[in-house]
Amino acid sequence: MSLKNLMVHLDQTERTAARLQLAVKLARSHGARLLGVFAQKAPAQQVGVVATWPSAAYVEARDESRRQFEQVTAGLDGAEWHDINRGSEAEVLRQVVNIARYADLVILGQHDERNAVTPEDLVLEVILDSGRPVLVVPYAGEFTDIGRHPLVAWNDAREAAHALNDALPLIQGCDEAIVLSFATRREDGDASCAGVIRHLAAHGVRARPEVMLVQDFGIMDMLLNRVTDRGADLLVMGAHGHIGFPFVSRGAGTRYILRHMIVPVLMAS
C-alpha cells in the first residue's frame, strides 16, 4: 500500500507542532496529500454562564491552528486544513473517526492528562472504529524521523498482520527491522517469526528475529524495554484483541502501550 492520503489531528497543545512536523515530512517523502483536522472538546462552562458555540477561546485556538498549518505546509501539494467545529466529546469522536476512514494513515498524539483538550478515548476510538492504521506520537520526545529502526511485535494474530502490512511504506528502506515474538517455548517463537521475515524480505526489508520467553506478567513492560534496548524508533503492533499475546487480557495491552509509549507506535486492528 502506498501512502497518498494522510490525516493529522491538530489542537491547541504544544505537541501539535511535533505531530504536524512529522506528518509534513511523511507527506513530502511519499508525495501524499495531507489533511490537518482541528478538533478539541468544548471547555467546561462556569455556573451561571450561558454557553455559546463556538466560544471565543475556541475561535482563537482554531485560527491559530490554521495559521500554523498553512505556514508549516507552505509548498506542500494537496495540503488542506479542516475544522470540525464541534465541542461535545461524542461529536468530536464521531467526526474524527469518520474523516479518518478516508486516510491511508492517521497521525494522532498520545493523550496527555496534563493538557487534555481532546477526549481521552480519541486515539483508541480511531484505532478500533476507523478501520485505518494509526500512528501515535508520544507527548514527550522528539521524533523527526521514524522507520529506520522499526520493531515489530508479532505472533500470528490478525491485528498484527494488519499492522505489519500497514507499516510497510514507513519501514521500506530501513536499516534493519526486528521481529519480536513472545512465546513460552523458543521453537514456537522461532516458527512465528520465520514467515514474517520471509514476507518482509519479499518487500526488500531486511529483518532479524528475536524471541522472548515470557510468563504471565509484565509482557508490555518487556516489550517497551526491548524497544529501548534495541534503539527502535517505531513500534509496530496490532491493537485490541490480545495484541497477538494470549497472556494479556483483551484490550489491556493496547491501553497500557498508549499510556506508556516511548516512541511512535503504528497500530491497526
Image (tube, rainbow, N blue to C red):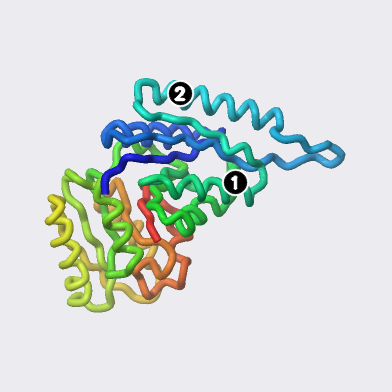
Residue 150, percent across and down?
A: 25, 50
Residue 140: name its quadrant: top left
Say whether residue 172 is left or right of residue 119.
left
Residue type indicated by callout 1:
Val
Quarter occupied by the C terminus: bottom left
Position in image of residue 211 (x %, y %): 22, 67
What residue do we see at 40% from left, 50% from top? Answer: 134
Q: Which mark is residue 92?
A: 1
Q: Is residue 215 positioned above or below 98 on the image?
A: below
Pick whichever of labels 2 and 1 is earlier in the sequence: 2
Task: Please say if 25 is above or below 175.
Answer: above
9 left or right, relative to 58: left
Q: Residue 220: x percent and y percent? A: 39, 63
Label 2 crowd bin: few (<14), some (14–19), many (20+), radius 10 Å:
some
Q: Nearer the viewer, residue 225 or 198?
A: 198
Q: In which quarter of the view is residue 118 placed?
A: top right
Q: Picture quarter containing residue 49?
A: top right
Circle 2 residue:
70
Residue 261 appears at what percent x and percent y? 41, 52
